[in-house]
Image: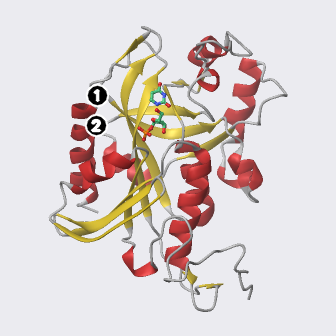
Amino acid sequence: MRTIPSSELIINDDGSIFHLHLRPEQLADTVILVGDPGRVELVASFFDTRECNVSNREFNTVTGTYKGKRMTVLSTGIGIGNIDISVTELDALANVDFETRQVKPELRRLTLLRLGTSGAIQPDIKVGEAVFSRMSIGFDGLLNYYKGRNEVCNLEYEQAFMRHTGWSDLLPKPYFAVADEGLFDLFRDSTREGITIAAPGFYAPQGRWVRLEPADAHLNEKIESFEYEGRRITNFEMESSALAGMASLMGHRAATICTIIAQRIALDACTDYKPFVKRMIRMALDKLATI
Ligand SMILES: O=P(O)(O)O[C@H]1O[C@H](CO)[C@@H](O)[C@H]1O
Ligand SMILES: O=c1cc[nH]c(=O)[nH]1
């Protein structure tokens, strides 16, 4: 059996994992991931009990209970690189023996739910709505670095999307990662189903033009008009693809729900979005407490 070298899985002197600074016993089976470090306290404010509060860089973590169910809430900061770190380290905490540095014979299956914010790219999706990313399109390329990527992605959608958009060979190949169906069933009545683009940036990668002009000024129009099997692309954010894709490869169940805070078609944005996010968090906690 492979022993993972200490340069590949870095464990701190106190027995915690390199970036998250968590020790294996501090991780619950149900994990809520949020981008904003300040959102951890908002989620944890609903908890009945708290057993630990750990912080390193942008990674804040609280483990506690909500309606008797043990949960961990973790902030990942912004972007796919931090999802690569967070999901790998969460999985290692659950499934690697830190003494032997070997994968445990019995694997633990985590439930990973990201609660984020997002911009809508269809005119009928309003600010304040919660969109469930049933599929996520990775514009970031991360999953292409992992073996088995084709086995967990929807390749038909990928081909159709690249054809429709005339995908530039300067960009990473997009991957279509799929959310856990059980989580979709849990949330289908309380959210709007969507297909979400996870972009490797907030500005040009989402078609925004401040001073630097996007390479393809018409890409968002092509994204908006893409339709396959009667489904369309609904929203932009920056993490859901790597979360869904890595969790599928590892055997965890994962999904993303985002509150819409920008309406890209109406050219509108809401900066007072926290009450909507709070509503999404309470809804998600109530559902997660039942499984
Ligand atoms: O509100 P969070 O969870 O950070 O999610 C969204 O907001 C950030 C950009 O403002 C990106 O992380 C994007 O995915
Ligand atoms: O438009 C948006 C809003 C929030 N987060 C994003 O990544 N994009």
Is 58 placed left or right of 83 in the picture? left
- For label 2, the crowd category at 10 Å Cα-Cα, with few meaning under 14, some 14 to 19 and many 20 or more, is many
The answer to whether one can see residue 71 in this image is: no
Residue 127, percent from left and from top: 32, 21
> Which of the 4 quarters of the picture holds residue 6?
bottom right
Residue 118, percent from left and from top: 43, 30
Is 62 placed left or right of 247 in the picture? left
Establish whether ligand 2 lies closer than 8 Å to the Cβ of label 1: no
The quarter of the picture where the N terminus appears is bottom right
- For label 1, the crowd category at 10 Å Cα-Cα, with few meaning under 14, some 14 to 19 and many 20 or more, is some
| Residue with the mark numbered 1 | 273
Residue 108, percent from left and from top: 48, 76
Q: How many marks?
A: 2
Q: Amino acid at mark 2?
A: Val
Return the residue nearer the eye: 103 or 74.
74
Q: Is residue 182 above or below residue 166?
A: below
Q: Residue at x 47, y 15 (%)?
A: 264
Please identify the residue farthest to the right as the structure is shown. Answer: 169
Say if mark 1 contacts mark 2, CB within 8 Å.
yes
Establish whether ligand 1 lies closer than 8 Å to the Cβ of label 2: yes
